[in-house]
Image (spheres, grey):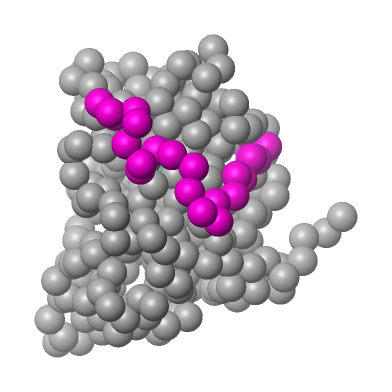
């Protein structure tokens, strides 16, 4: 059955996420499994202690091959089919839950809450989560609160800074940030499916209770970069990619690199939604 991108675009706008089925082929998946396993093996033990809740939090800038995923033609074609012809990209992380590991805490990843655009339907920043294995609630599938990119949820007021250390270490499994919450849904996927969603959406992941590693690669895109307020463009364009990663991939990555030529000051990031989120 063919994919109805118009329907998926509507889901992205209304629910804050959509599932792009079967985008990554078997050969690319096999390559990504090898590459991410090697990236994980290179980390010091302290990395895993700091990030028990995520499993790992390894920048894709640690591995030049990852540029081929960022600019992977089926991903760019799916974005174009959704109406995003000129997306930009900023960063990404290998989030790999080892066997028998704790849940990932509820959080949202938006940084521009000080700008009024964050309280509108404009698509600003989106994750593309690329799962390298099939996921279920048993091995750590994604959990989402549909609509929470546009509507306040009790967790918005209760959560501590999602990017602070406390939740990452998963020292207190009873913390409400790991528990079931009102309105949440599970999103199990097949290996090679891609979940696209708003950075403003509240999301989490189940514990991995299986005996196999569950790896996801989260890539951050700006699907409508040219329509974003200039202060946000200036902020994104100010961040250079590391030279040793960028250099071998310049041609591939250049079309996705955020650029800004105006004179607006970069916005100061703020991760906490204001009263404008009703
Ligand atoms: O690993 C997952 O399933 C979710 C990752 C995530 O929440 C994130 O990258 O922000």
At a point 59% along the width and 49% down the height, the residue shown is: 185
- Relative height, residue 96 to residue 235 (above, below): above
**Residue 264: x and y, percent?**
16, 85
The outermost residue toward the right is 1
At a point 68% along the width and 37% down the height, the residue shown is: 190
Question: Would you say residue 207 sits in the magenta stretch?
Answer: no
- Residue 121 appears left or right of 113: right
- Relative height, residue 62 to residue 272 (above, below): above
**In which quadrant of the rendered view does residue 57 lie?**
top left
Q: Is residue 8 visible?
A: yes
Magenta stretch: give its range: 170-192
Q: Is residue 68 visible?
A: no
**Residue 36: x and y, percent?**
43, 27
Task: State which quarter of the image contains the C terminus.
Answer: bottom left
**In which quadrant of the rendered view does residue 58 lie?**
top left
**In which quadrant of the rendered view does residue 277 lie?**
bottom left
Query: Magenta region's main secondary structure?
Result: loop
- Relative height, residue 262 to residue 54 (above, below): below
């Amino acid at each position: 059955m063919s994919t109805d991108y118009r329907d998926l675009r509507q889901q992205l706008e209304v629910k804050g996420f959509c599932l792009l089925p079967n985008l990554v082929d078997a050969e690319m998946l096999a390559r990504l499994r090898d590459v991410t396993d090697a990236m994980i093996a290179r980390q010091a033990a302290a990395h895993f202690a700091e990030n028990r809740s995520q499993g790992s939090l390894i920048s894709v800038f640690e591995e030049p091959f990852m540029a081929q995923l960022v600019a992977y033609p089926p991903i760019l074609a799916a974005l174009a089919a959704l109406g995003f012809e000129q997306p930009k990209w900023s960063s990404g992380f290998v989030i790999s839950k080892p066997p028998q590991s704790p849940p990932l805490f509820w959080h949202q990843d938006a940084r521009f809450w000080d700008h009024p655009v964050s309280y509108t339907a404009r698509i600003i920043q989106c994750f593309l989560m690329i799962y390298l294995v099939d996921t279920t609630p048993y091995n750590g599938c994604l959990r989402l609160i549909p609509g929470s990119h546009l509507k306040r949820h009790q967790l918005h007021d209760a959560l501590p800074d999602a990017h602070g250390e406390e939740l990452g270490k998963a020292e207190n499994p009873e913390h409400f940030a790991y528990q079931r919450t009102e309105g949440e849904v599970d999103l199990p996927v097949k290996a090679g499916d891609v979940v696209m969603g708003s950075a403003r959406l509240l999301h989490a992941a189940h514990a991995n209770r299986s005996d196999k590693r569950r790896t996801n690669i989260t890539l951050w895109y700006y699907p409508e970069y040219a329509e974003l307020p200039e202060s946000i463009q200036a902020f994104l364009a100010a961040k250079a990619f590391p030279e040793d990663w960028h250099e071998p991939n310049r041609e591939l990555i250049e079309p996705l690199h955020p650029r800004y030529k105006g004179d607006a000051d970069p916005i100061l990031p703020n991760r906490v939604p204001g009263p404008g989120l009703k």
